[in-house]
Amino acid sequence: MAHSVLGLLGLALTTAALVILGLRVLPGPRARSLATPHPRRVLAIGAHPDDLELACGGTLAKLSDSGHEVHALVLSHGERGGEGAARPREARTGGVLLGLTSVQVHDFLDTRLGEDPVGLVQAIEAMIRRVNPDIVLTHSGHDQHQDHQAVHEATLRAARQSTSILCYESPSATPDFRPSVFVDIDEYVEVKVAAVAAHRDQGRKPYMTPERVRGIATFRGSQAKVASAEGYEPVRLLGSALGEL
């Protein structure tokens, strides 16, 4: 029997367009379930170190603790926005805090990812072949940062055969970012805060503060009618409102 991504994530439907993905987690802090009936593979793709922690860190930690295989692909060292030698290390540290299965960091030119669209697509395609993900998370097209836009477009091309793609919210998202899929991260907000804090090179930026991270989670939670959430725009999402097909 085929099992949908929504069934995997424990779907709760609130309206036709508003979805909360409530992932199964054992009680207690950072408890990892070894009894997930249908473990899946997740690939999260970001332009820079810290993008994934800021945008979907709570979701990734929750998926990992639920027994799923979670991989990260970071496409640059972020050298134009900070210390290029330190930031890949910080990405790997953040990955450890989130419980990721793997973190791969490429060295495409920061702020100029769009200058090599073929290379980006090829790098993402190679990771998709290796991981064979059931669900892909990536930047939204509703984003002011040129690198985020480039990664969004490259992901849609590279993941053209993927059945489920969700686009996350970055600090540079435009007002046109309108999520309709939400993940309840109430038990994972502080995990996300810690993973963001691992990026010490970026610590002076206003969107890196614990208050900002918690505030966005609270805002998206209010939209999803839970305490804290992360929001996503679906490109496509395999499954049904009733769970497993």
Image (spheres, rainbow, N blue to C red):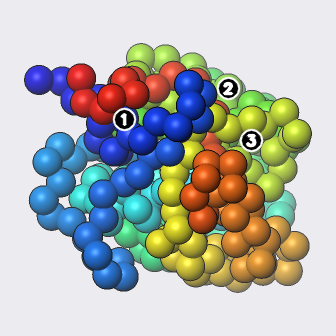
For the residues marked 1 and 2, what is the alpha-carbon distance in whole angstroms? 24 Å
Under mark 3, the amino acid is His
Find disc 1 in the rendering and name its residue.
6
Q: Position of residue 180 (x, y in %)?
A: 63, 35
Query: As displayed, is residue 144 above or below residue 89?
Result: above
User: Based on the displayed image, in which of its 4 quarters is residue 198 positioned?
Assistant: bottom right
Find disc 3 in the rendering and name its residue.
148
Q: Position of residue 13 (x, y in %)?
A: 46, 36
Query: As displayed, is residue 70 above or below residue 98?
Result: above
Could one spot residue 136 in this view of the protein? yes
For the residues marked 3 and 2, what is the alpha-carbon distance in whole angstroms? 9 Å
Question: Sequence-wise, which precedes: disc 1 or disc 3?
Answer: 1
Give the structural element (helix, strand or loop) at label 1: helix
Task: Tell me if mark 3 has few (under 14), some (14-19) or many (20+) residues whose alpha carbon lies within 10 angstroms of its own.
Answer: many
Q: Residue at x 30, y 57 (%)?
A: 24
From the viewer's perspective, tell me whether residue 207 is left or right of residue 64: right
Contact between labelled residues 2 and 3, with CB atoms less than 8 Å apart: no
Q: Which mark is residue 202?
A: none
Under mark 1, the amino acid is Leu
Under mark 2, the amino acid is Glu
Give the structural element (helix, strand or loop) at label 2: helix
Q: Residue at x 51, y 22 (%)?
A: 236
Query: As displayed, is residue 225 above or below residue 61?
Result: above
Image quadrant containing the C terminus: top left
Q: Position of residue 122 (x, y in %)?
A: 52, 29
Find disc 2 in the rendering and name its residue.
153
Question: Sequence-wise, which precedes: disc 3 or disc 2?
Answer: 3
> In front: mark 1 or mark 2?
1
Contact between labelled residues 2 and 1, with CB atoms less than 8 Å apart: no
User: Based on the displayed image, in which of its 4 quarters is residue 120 positioned?
Assistant: top right
- Nearer to us in this view, 86 or 165: 165
